Image: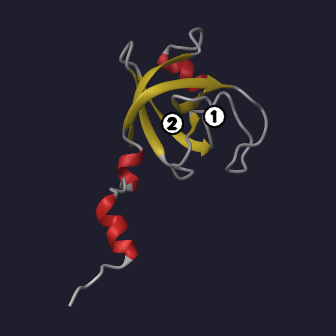
């Protein structure tokens, strides 16, 4: 007698799923933006606030973001969706970019972790 596994069990064994805690721990390229429109969370974008846009982290998630080029770090709160540029992992408010020291460059290499 042959037993077959349910399709979901086969899929779960084939693919590994990232835990939500791991989604906030990554490195990549970040840019900044300074709009005055509403964010995806419904609040108005404030370029002077320490906020950021991430594709999938829940709104309100706090991240410690470190600029890999100069070692400066800030804590930001996710309140928007993005970035929408291929290869970027985070869009930061202008204030966060200034604190990290990359406003003139426009983008930089960062690492982020849940805070």
What's the mark number on residue 40? Answer: none
Earlier in the chain: of badge 2 and badge 1, it is 2
> SS at mark 2?
strand
- Of circles 2 and 1, the one toward us is 1
Q: Are marks 2 and 1 in contact (CB under 8 Å)?
A: no
**Quarter that holds the C terminus:** top left
User: Picture coordinates of residue 62 (x, y %)?
Assistant: 47, 44
Identify whether 54 is placed above or below 41.
above
Task: Name the residue nearer the viewer: 57 or 7.
Answer: 7
**What is the tally of numbered marks visible in this picture?**
2
Name the residue at the top extreme: 104
Q: CA distance from mark 2 to mark 1?
A: 19 Å
Q: How is the image coloured?
A: secondary structure
Is disc 2 surrounded by few (<14), some (14 to 19) or many (20+) residues within 10 Å? many
Identify whether 66 is placed above or below 12.
above
Task: Name the residue nearer the viewer: 22 or 50.
Answer: 22
Is disc 1 surrounded by few (<14), some (14 to 19) or many (20+) residues within 10 Å? few
Picture residue at 38% right of the left edge, 13% below the top:
70
> Which picture quadrant has residue 37?
top right
Picture residue at 49% right of the left edge, 48% below the top:
61
> SS at mark 1?
loop
Identify whether 68 is placed above or below 3.
above
User: Picture coordinates of residue 44 (x, y %)?
Assistant: 74, 41
Name the residue at the right extreme: 37
> Which picture quadrant has residue 109?
top left
In the displayed structure image, the side of residue 38 where residue 77 appears, left or right: left
Picture residue at 69% right of the left edge, 47% below the top:
40
What's the mark number on residue 76? Answer: 2
User: Picture coordinates of residue 24 (x, y %)?
Assistant: 41, 44
Tell me the residue that label 1 is attached to: 84
Picture residue at 56% right of the left edge, 33% below the top:
50
């Amino acid at each position: 007698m042959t037993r077959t596994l349910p399709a979901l069990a086969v899929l779960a064994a084939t693919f590994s799923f990232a835990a939500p805690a791991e989604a906030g721990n990554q490195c990549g390229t970040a840019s900044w933006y300074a709009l005055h429109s509403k964010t995806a969370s419904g609040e108005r974008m404030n370029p002077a606030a320490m906020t950021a846009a991430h594709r999938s982290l829940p709104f309100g998630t706090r991240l410690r973001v470190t600029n890999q080029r100069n070692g400066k770090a800030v804590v930001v709160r996710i309140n928007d969706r993005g970035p929408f540029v291929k290869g970027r992992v985070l869009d930061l408010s202008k204030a966060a970019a200034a604190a990290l020291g990359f406003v003139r460059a426009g983008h930089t290499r960062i690492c982020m972790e849940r805070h």
